[in-house]
Image (cartoon, grey):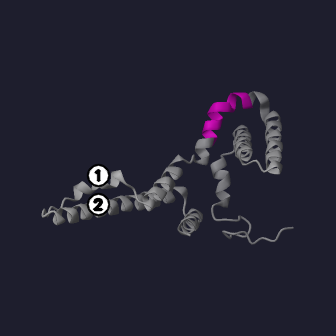
Amino acid sequence: MILYDLGAFLYALIKQFSLVALRALCLRIEFLCVVKSIVVGARRESAEKENEGHSHNRIGCGIATHNKKKGPWSQVLTKIVSFIFSAMRIGEFQELIRQTYMGKDSARGISGTYQWFVEEVGELARAIRKSDHRALEEEVADCLAWLVSLANLSGVDVEKAVDKYRDGCPKCGRAECGCTEH
């Protein structure tokens, strides 16, 4: 239940804030968890020393406690923060595809690149029919790469193009589309 609530919370955050704001928020949350862990470790150490007849209050000693054992929330937040920082921005991906494939894409032209894109969409359709998750991941990545190649050849900035979805549905303006299908 806790992880579901955390997932719902993060989903809501992603819908409300930009990725940059979400990264900053996660860093603040992780910082607060580290501070709490240090303080709790220092308090625990202080209590242990009091029981031994020594009363030393050294917060710095709590750092070792934090590094030795992380609580479940710290582990979850660490995974979330590492995921967010490992995710590539759309513009970074477009530049990577440009650097890697622009020579071949230019030689092939828009029409030839489009044909390769359509072939990848066909492979994606086969993976969907087979319910093969690993193949789905590969084909989604391939389709995205070929679509970005088409954007590069056409001079389209993909990051700018997808900005129209920043606030939800571009037609009705709602976070959850309320448009009636035609």
Residue displayed at 71% across by 64% down = 170
Q: Would residue 45 be counted in the magenta stretch? A: no
Q: Is residue 128 left or right of residue 61?
A: right
SS for callout 2? helix
Quadrant (top left, top right, bottom left, bottom right) of the N terminus? bottom right
Mark 1 surroundings: few (<14), some (14-19) or many (≥20) residues within 10 A: few
What is the residue that sits farthest to the front in this orientation?
A: 52
Q: Which mark is residue 64?
A: 1
Proximity of marks 1 and 2: CB atoms separated by less than 8 Å: yes
Q: Amino acid at mark 2?
A: Gly
x and y, in percent, of residue 38 in the image: 30, 59
Q: SS at mark 1?
A: helix
Amino acid marked by disc 1: Ala
Magenta-colored span = 94-105
Q: Residue 99 in magenta? A: yes
Please name whichever residue, 44 or 173, is drawn nearer the observer in this view of the structure. 44
Mark 2 crowdedness (10 Å alpha carbons): few <14, some 14-19, many ≥20 = many
Q: Main secondary structure of the magenta part?
A: helix
Report x, y in % for residue 70.
39, 56
